[in-house]
Image: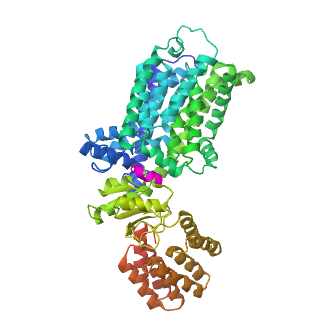
């Protein structure tokens, strides 16, 4: 490999990689805008930070609504403070979030270049490859455009490690403290650095300092004491901040999420393995494995170890989430801070593979051959990452549309249709709070700490909603299904997740047990696919859990209708209407029954009554289009209802 590289070459490589990565992010964002017709975020959480930041900017209080909900409900207080400062410059939440995300992404890439420059001396090909892989990793681009603190955390994470490597005491303490103010996982990274320090102090063989050796090998502990002092002050301030606002050392979001999501996790290791080794990652994963073997070998031989921190961080973060939050979703955003370290290990894998290969393959001992092989592997990896970013840009647009069609659309409906003093109970508090302008009550405890002890108890939840004087609920049906009550508003009925708004009546509103709701949803999915015989047992199981669910009885009546069992269907329809006389789904099933009995006029009257109550209930328009097309032979009327159905669902007729 090349044995010399000037600072100018390094500078050009870094500049080109950073600019290319920034342009790739801009392109992904612009592509999503062209596809969806609006800017958006791929998840709901960014608006939580924005809501805190806007309130802080407007009333000077770290609260979620005016001065009424003061709480440490932001997982990243530092990011929230930066957003609040940004609101002095612009009121556009999208532009502000994108700029911060991309800026910290580029800053993280620059810090990574300084780290790789120290690790990969005289190897410009590997140096350039590492920066390029980081900037073109599609999930990191997703994170930069997510409106979250992800790239800020990665930037501070890499900067902390860099300052630790060069033994810059006070700056290390400052950065480490800010890292904790960005995400609580920083505590784990502190343990990683402590283990690395202990390894090189107590276990690794002493090596005589050499002229020009990296500063981290030089003696003296003064840098460490100053780092600990500064970091300790900032960490103490962080604890006081959380204790004052919510009575806990960590943000109450930590307790809420671990309480709500902390069960399960049997399949988590396999999911993480696929996340790290599939798609554009297999070649890199093999190289990482080579690097891991080299790390183990050096530990056994008590050699100096430059890559112990990346290994410990990756293993530790995976283990922590497996234990506390074993869910890999939203592009694996919680594990994204692993990716720069995985990339570094992959680059190290190339170095080890080529070095070891020299012993077996004689031509590799020639400089130009080694350089060509290294460049070839590096180019292959970079090409895979660039291609993956191109292909996955549409995925980012899909995520943004998914959130926009549910949370944002619901928030705008709440803003336009509910009184100013309405109190909204919801589990997705981001966009709904930010755009509705209404006070929200958090049903999963992220900004309502007193809800955390009630997680998992519908009785406790109902009491919590009553105490907070909730007037309306905005919930995804698969999270919280309200039994025997028609929604005031709902998003596309045909979508996998349906957001619904209900008036909350403390005496009437009742939640369906989640296992029963899940079985009903699965049964309805199978019914829609025409698999009636598989749907029936699931719906029967749902009714055994919750026999007072009008929705489940309406669903099983549809199964009976599909089998031609009209008597059984009529029995279930009547049972559903007894439980909920205004049930749209039960009356929709009744319409089908009337059509089967050739009573078309009565069926149309039933459907029209539903439309009078809510013209946005899309399935009724589809039912009417079928009647007009197949029974009455009125093509114009059929097309009108089919067009209305397409308008409501966004699906072409």
Q: Quadrant of residue 206?
A: top right
**Vertical arrangement, residue 483 with respect to residue 215, above or below:** below
> Can see residue 51?
yes
Q: Quadrant of the N terminus?
A: top right
Residue for point 42% across, 24% down? 173
Report the residue at 60% width, 35% height from top: 315
Give the image location of residue 626, x and y in percent: 48, 81
Residue 372 picture location, percent across and down: 62, 26
Q: Is residue 151 left or right of residue 344?
A: left
- Write down the quadrant of residue 349 in the picture: top right
Q: Splitting the image into 4 quarters, where does residue 439 fall?
A: bottom left
Left or right: 12 as drawn, with respect to 545: left
Identity of the residue drawn at 51% across and 31% down: 189
- Can residue 19 be seen here? The reply is no
> Residue 220: horizontal and vertical position, in percent?
50, 11
Query: Is-magenta flag for residue 452?
Result: yes
Q: Depth check: 374 or 158 in front? A: 158
Height in image: 607 above or below 330? below
Provide the residue span drawn in magenta. 446-453
Place of residue 459 in the rendered image (x, y in percent of width and height, measured from the top left)? 47, 62
Give the total of numbered labels.
0
Task: Name the dominant secondary structure of the magenta segment.
Answer: helix
Closer to us: 514 or 604: 514
Q: Is residue 553 magenta?
A: no
Q: Return the residue found at the far right.
A: 360
């Amino acid at each position: 490999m090349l044995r010399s590289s000037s600072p100018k070459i390094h500078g050009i490589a870094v500049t080109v990689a950073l600019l290319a990565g920034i342009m790739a992010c801009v392109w992904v964002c612009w592509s999503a805008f062209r596809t969806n017709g609006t800017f958006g975020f791929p998840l709901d959480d960014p608006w939580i930070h924005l809501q805190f930041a806007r309130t802080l900017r407007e009333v000077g209080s770290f609260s979620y609504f005016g001065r009424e909900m003061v709480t440490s409900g932001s997982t990243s207080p530092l990011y929230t403070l930066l957003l609040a400062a940004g609101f002095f410059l612009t009121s556009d939440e999208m532009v502000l979030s994108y700029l911060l995300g991309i800026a910290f992404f580029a800053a993280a890439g620059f810090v990574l270049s300084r780290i790789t420059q120290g690790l990969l001396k005289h190897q410009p090909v590997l140096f350039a490859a590492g920066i390029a892989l980081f900037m073109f990793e599609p999930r990191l681009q997703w994170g930069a455009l997510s409106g979250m603190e992800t790239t800020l955390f990665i930037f501070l994470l890499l900067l902390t490690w860099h300052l630790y490597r060069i033994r810059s005491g006070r700056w290390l303490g400052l950065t480490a403290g800010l890292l904790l103010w960005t995400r609580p996982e920083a505590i784990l990274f502190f343990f990683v650095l402590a283990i690395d320090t202990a390894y090189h102090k107590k276990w690794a063989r002493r090596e005589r300092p050499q002229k020009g050796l990296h500063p981290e090998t030089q003696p003296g502990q003064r840098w460490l004491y100053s780092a600990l002092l500064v970091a300790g002050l900032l960490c103490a301030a962080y604890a006081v901040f959380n204790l004052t606002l919510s009575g806990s050392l960590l943000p109450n979001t930590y307790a809420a999420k671990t309480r709500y999501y902390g069960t399960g996790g049997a399949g988590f290791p396999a999911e993480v393995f696929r996340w790290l080794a599939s798609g554009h990652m297999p070649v890199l994963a093999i190289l990482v494995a080579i690097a891991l073997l080299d790390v183990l070998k050096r530990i056994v031989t008590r050699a100096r170890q430059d890559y112990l921190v990346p290994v410990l961080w990756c293993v530790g973060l995976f283990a922590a989430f497996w234990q506390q939050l074993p869910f890999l979703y939203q592009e694996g955003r919680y594990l994204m801070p692993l990716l720069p370290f995985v990339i570094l290990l992959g680059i190290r894998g190339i170095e080890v593979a080529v070095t070891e290969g020299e012993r077996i393959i004689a031509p590799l001992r020639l400089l130009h051959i080694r350089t060509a092989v290294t460049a070839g592997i590096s180019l292959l990896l970079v090409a895979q990452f660039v291609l993956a970013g191109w292909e996955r840009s549409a995925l980012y647009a899909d995520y943004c549309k998914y959130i926009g069609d549910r949370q944002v659309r619901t928030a705008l409906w709440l803003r336009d249709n509910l009184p100013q003093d309405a109190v909204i109970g919801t589990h997705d508090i981001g966009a709904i709070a930010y755009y509705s302008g209404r006070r929200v009550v958090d049903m999963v405890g992220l900004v309502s700490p007193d809800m955390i002890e009630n997680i998992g108890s519908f009785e406790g939840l109902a009491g919590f909603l009553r105490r907070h004087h909730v007037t309306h609920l905005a919930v995804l049906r698969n999270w919280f299904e309200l039994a025997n009550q028609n929604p005031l508003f709902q998003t596309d009925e045909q979508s996998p997740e349906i957001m619904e708004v209900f008036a909350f009546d403390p005496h009437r509103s009742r939640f369906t047990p989640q296992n029963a709701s899940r079985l009903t949803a699965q049964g309805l999915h199978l019914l829609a696919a025409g698999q009636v015989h598989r749907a029936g047992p699931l719906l029967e199981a749902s009714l055994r859990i919750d026999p007072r669910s009008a929705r489940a009885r309406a669903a099983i009546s549809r199964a009976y209708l599909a089998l031609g069992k009209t008597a059984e269907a009529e029995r279930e329809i009547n049972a559903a209407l007894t439980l909920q006389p205004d049930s749209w789904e039960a009356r929709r099933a009744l319409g089908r029954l009337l059509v089967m009995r050739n009573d078309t006029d009565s069926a149309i009257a039933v459907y029209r009554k539903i439309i009078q109550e809510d013209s946005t209930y899309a399935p009724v328009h589809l039912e009417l289009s079928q009647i007009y097309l197949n029974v009455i032979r009125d093509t114009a009327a059929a097309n009108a209802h089919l067009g209305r159905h397409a308008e409501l669902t966004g699906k072409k007729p």
